[in-house]
Image: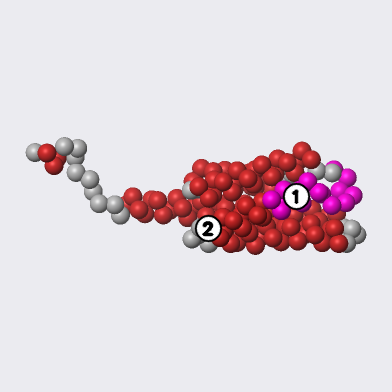
């Protein structure tokens, strides 16, 4: 007997990863999570539901997102954007493979896109959790503050 995942599980997981980035992340994580949600919405609205060819709108948004995450990866000392950019590059390569060989089966094209986009979102969530952990450690290691006005006595 085959167990099939509920249809809502993967989109909920993707959105959940993005929400973690928005809720707990710093500037880079929030920008990336917001851009991911925007690209996801654009994909849902403008995709070709027949999957007869390359998803051009998704291809365009994926290239734009790759440029964004590449810019972030080059400017931040954090490591998660490197992983996110690598996964995003694989997603763009998947579109390029479909352009080069239009006989790539739609199931393989869709599955690869889902895998790479979820890996990018998971990278953002890991970055946000690490950022939150760093803030908590900084607060725990901060010197205790005196009561207000204690130095004026």
Does the magenta-highlighted stretch encompass residue 53? yes
- Residue designated by label 2: 75
Quadrant where the N terminus is found in the figure:
bottom right
In the current view of this chain or complex, which residue is farthest to the left? 153
Instruction: Give the camera-side residue of 89 and 127.
Output: 89
Say above or below: 23 vs 120: above
Q: Around disc 2, counting alpha carbons within 10 Å, would you say few (fewer than 14), some (14 to 19), or many (20 or more)?
A: few
Secondary structure of residue under mark 2: helix
Q: Which residue is drawn at 69% across and 48% down?
A: 10
Q: Is residue 81 left or right of residue 11?
A: left
> Is residue 118 at least partly visible in the picture?
no
How many angstroms separate mark 2 from mark 1 (CA)? 23 Å
Q: In which quarter of the image is residue 2?
A: bottom right
Secondary structure of residue under mark 1: helix
Report x, y in % for residue 92.
Answer: 74, 57
Does the magenta-highlighted stretch encompass residue 114? no
- In the image, the segment drawn in magenta is 49-64
In the rendered view, how is the structure colored?
secondary structure
Q: Around disc 1, counting alpha carbons within 10 Å, would you say few (fewer than 14), some (14 to 19), or many (20 or more)?
A: some
Report x, y in % for residue 103.
Answer: 91, 59
Report x, y in % for residue 121.
Answer: 62, 52
Instruction: Give the camera-side residue of 20 and 52.
Output: 52
> Is residue 71 at least partly visible in the picture?
yes
Q: Residue at x 75, y 49 (%)?
A: 60
Q: In which quarter of the image is residue 88?
A: bottom right
- Residue designated by label 1: 60
């Amino acid at each position: 007997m085959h167990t099939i995942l509920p249809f809502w599980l993967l989109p909920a997981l993707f959105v959940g990863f993005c929400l973690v980035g928005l809720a707990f992340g710093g500037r880079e994580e929030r920008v990336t999570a917001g851009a991911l949600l925007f690209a996801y919405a654009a994909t849902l609205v403008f995709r070709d539901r027949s999957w007869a060819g390359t998803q051009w709108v998704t291809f365009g948004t994926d290239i734009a997102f790759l440029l964004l995450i590449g810019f972030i990866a080059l400017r931040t000392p954090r490591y998660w954007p490197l992983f996110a950019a690598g996964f995003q590059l694989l997603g763009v390569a998947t579109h390029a493979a479909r352009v080069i060989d239009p006989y790539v089966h739609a199931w393989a094209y869709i599955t690869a896109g889902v895998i790479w986009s979820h890996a990018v979102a998971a990278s953002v969530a890991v970055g946000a959790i690490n950022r939150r952990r760093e803030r908590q450690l900084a607060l725990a290691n901060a010197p205790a503050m005196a009561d207000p006005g204690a130095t004026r006595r």
